[in-house]
Amino acid sequence: MKRLHLILALGTILFGCGTNQQTADTSGQETDSGLNEIHRPQFHFTPRAKWMNDPNGMVYHNGEYHLFYQHNPDSTVWGPMHWGHAVSKDMVHWEHLPIALYPDSLGTIFSGSAVVDIGNTSGLGSEENPAMVAIYTYHNAEAERAGRNDFQTQGLAFSLDNGRTWEKYKKNPVMENPGIRDFRDPKVSWYEAGKKWIMTLAVSDHISFYSSKNLLDWQHESDFGKGIGAHGGVWECPDLFKMPVEGTNQEKWVLLVSINPGGPNGGSATQYFVGEFDGKSFTLDKEFLADQNTSSTEPAEENKDGVWLDYGRDNYAGVTWANVPEQDGRRLFMGWMSNWDYANQVPTENWRSAMTIARTLTLENTAAGLRVASKPVKELQNIFDKKISLKDTTVTNELLLSEQFTTFDLKLSLEPVGQQTDFAIELSNDVNQKVLIGYDATKGQYYIDRTSSGANNFSENFAGIQYAPRISTATGFDLRLLVDVASVELFADGGKTAMTAIFFPDEKFTKVRLLTPNGRYKLTAGEIVNLKSIYDERVAKQ
Ligand code: FRU
């Protein structure tokens, strides 16, 4: 603790601001707080201060990636929700902007999406200067306390100056609540084939699709999901988009659905479905969920396991960017790097929680059927620093890979010598704390073990081992790990299995070892690239 206080005091001197009392000033412009707290991620997006959860309104416009987020500017725990705001040219370096949306008489501002109304269908902008339109959920806490069920409605706000200032739509809400408690998180996208907008909305245990010609008047089209996939908790934060199937001329629709609790390793997680969408309804591919069960003949509707975008504990409520230019063509994703099981308790002092790295999603044919693979965006190279190439060698028992970096991008190709056996990459510090990211050959599963990773008594749900099925059937392993000071993201087998986990060591993890306790592996290729802090330039300018 002493060390932590020393660092905080140093932070106060360096950044010229108190570390504990930073909140939004009246202009909504916030200041940095605790930038160099020991657990402050160095290349992941974090709020300048106070509480953050879901990414919202992710939209690309005029050369900027916008990221809005669920934000409580007055506290480091969840509370009255606002939309915080930041922009980036590369999804790696972020410029914080003033709070975009404040609560009003209709409620606080829950999760939602943003689009650019290119054709000025809403009449809120013009064809020369199309409006950026945010569609979000109003949460009326007073109505909830009064015992009503219709306290969540959908509202709309627009900006004519690249998201710098916002006006709420005068006739809000644009969608009333039919009397359902969980009725939220609208994700709107343009459906070109029908020249209309589609809203994908989470409605307690299913998804409802609505359509609109003008973003203002919405009509119900269909429902999907009752009894299909995982239902261990309420459905939240959906997303619907079309994706090409890699290496084919085929296209499919992917429906993301976050769920809390009920994730594969407990608490919150994001499942997805692959199928068709015809402008009205989503139809699940028959074989999509069938393979998940022990008996592959079981109909999809009886599968309760779900297929998960990320099997780790800390990737929730993620959705994809709207309006990414066609020439770019990528499906770009970002999630909240925490879990409702303990998000309000994690041991950071001035701010709470980070986003995952921005990821490119692809849809691929695998041994398990069509699966969404995740990879860090290529713009991550903007913070590449010193690189160590790892020599082609055979590992018996253990190999020290590096002991100098705390934020890095590690790539390893491993071939078993003989049978596949257990292996792990161990991140450790000098006070005996460690995280293991490994493969359990008996189970055929990847895992992250953060049992001894440092602080974990803030919640009984935090410590433990989390598992993910291996989808690839290759004998060799292709692994990529992004390690920040308080998180690891595993992209295994070209991203077909992804796992994200956070941790809170008392001292930074500097040692990286490859452990092969019960067998031998040939390290056929590998490199470890130090990643620069996204704060370097800002610190240098102080
Ligand atoms: C998901 C969620 C959303 C809701 C928001 C409130 O994490 O519960 O369903 O809109 O957070 O902050």
Image: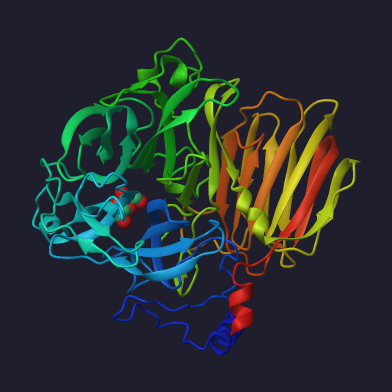
Say if residue 345 shows up in the picture: no
Query: Image quadrant of residue 302?
Result: top left
Q: Which residue occupies the foreground of this view, 182 or 26?
A: 26
Q: Is residue 498 left or right of residue 63?
A: right
**Residue drawn at x 20%, y 56% as measured from the top left:** 139
Q: Is residue 436 left or right of residue 59?
A: right
Label tally = 0
Q: Is residue 437 left or right of residue 417?
A: left
**Percent from the top left, x then y, of residue 375?**
60, 42
494, above or below 41, in the image = above
153, above or below 485, in the image = above
**Residue drawn at x 38%, y 59% as measured from the top left:** 68
**Percent from the top left, x then y, of residue 520?**
86, 35
Q: What kind of colouring is applied to the model shown?
A: rainbow
Query: Image quadrant of residue 345?
Result: bottom left
Q: Which residue occupies the foreground of this view, 165 or 512?
A: 165
349, above or below 144, in the image = below
Say if residue 309 shows up in the picture: yes
**Percent from the top left, x then y, of residue 171?**
10, 54
Q: Which residue occupies the foreground of this view, 126 or 268?
A: 126
If the image is split into quadrants, where does the C terminus sit? bottom right
If the image is split into quadrants, where does the N terminus sit? bottom right
Q: Residue furthest front?
A: 128
Query: Image quadrant of residue 469?
Result: top right
Q: Residue furthest top?
A: 297
**Percent from the top left, x then y, of residue 511?**
77, 60
**Residue drawn at x 38%, y 31% as measured from the top left:** 230
**Residue drawn at x 46%, y 9% as measured from the top left:** 297
